[in-house]
Image (cartoon, rainbow, N blue to C red):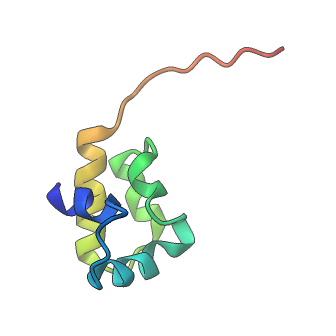
């Protein structure tokens, strides 16, 4: 998960980040890592890079929270 930490670090200006930014651009970049996405939903992103797909699946396996949110109408 160090890869994700390095990717999300705004101070890290490594060239490799531009490659992954290109693939994540249509998914709002690093929003994929801050959302509560189920691992099973990652294929719906239609990512063409298998490494990035594996990283996002692993990240969401560790971070997904199945919480029932109560929506209250006002």
Residue drawn at the location 29% of the way across and 69% of the way down: 12
The quadrant holding residue 19 is: bottom left
Q: Is residue 64 left or right of residue 24?
A: left
The quadrant holding residue 54 is: bottom left
Q: Please provide percent x and percent y for residue 15.
A: 29, 85
The quadrant holding residue 6 is: bottom left
Residue 64 sits above or below residue 41 on the image = above
Residue 59 sits above or below residue 49 on the image = above
Q: So how many labels did they put on this image? A: 0
Residue 40 sits above or below residue 21 on the image = above
Q: Please provide percent x and percent y for residue 50.
A: 26, 76
Residue at the front extreme?
11
Q: Please provide percent x and percent y for residue 66.
A: 39, 28
Q: Nearer the viewer, residue 57 or 20?
A: 20
Q: Is residue 58 left or right of residue 48?
A: left
Residue drawn at the location 43% of the way across and 60% of the way down: 30
Q: Is residue 28 left or right of residue 58?
A: right
Residue drawn at the location 38% of the way across and 53% of the way down: 33
Residue drawn at the location 34% of the way across and 37% of the way down: 64
Q: Nearer the viewer, residue 9 or 25?
A: 9
Split into 4 quadrants, where in the image is the C terminus? top right
Q: Nearer the viewer, residue 22 or 51?
A: 22
Q: Please provide percent x and percent y for residue 69.
A: 55, 21
Split into 4 quadrants, where in the image is the N terminus? bottom left
Residue at the left extreme?
2
């Amino acid at each position: 998960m160090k890869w994700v930490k390095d990717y999300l670090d705004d101070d890290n200006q490594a060239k490799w980040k531009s490659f992954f930014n290109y693939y994540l651009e249509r998914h709002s970049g690093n929003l994929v890592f801050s959302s509560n996405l189920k691992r099973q939903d990652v294929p719906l992103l239609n990512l063409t890079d298998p490494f990035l797909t594996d990283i996002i699946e692993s990240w969401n396996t560790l971070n997904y929270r199945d919480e029932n949110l109560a929506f209250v109408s006002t």
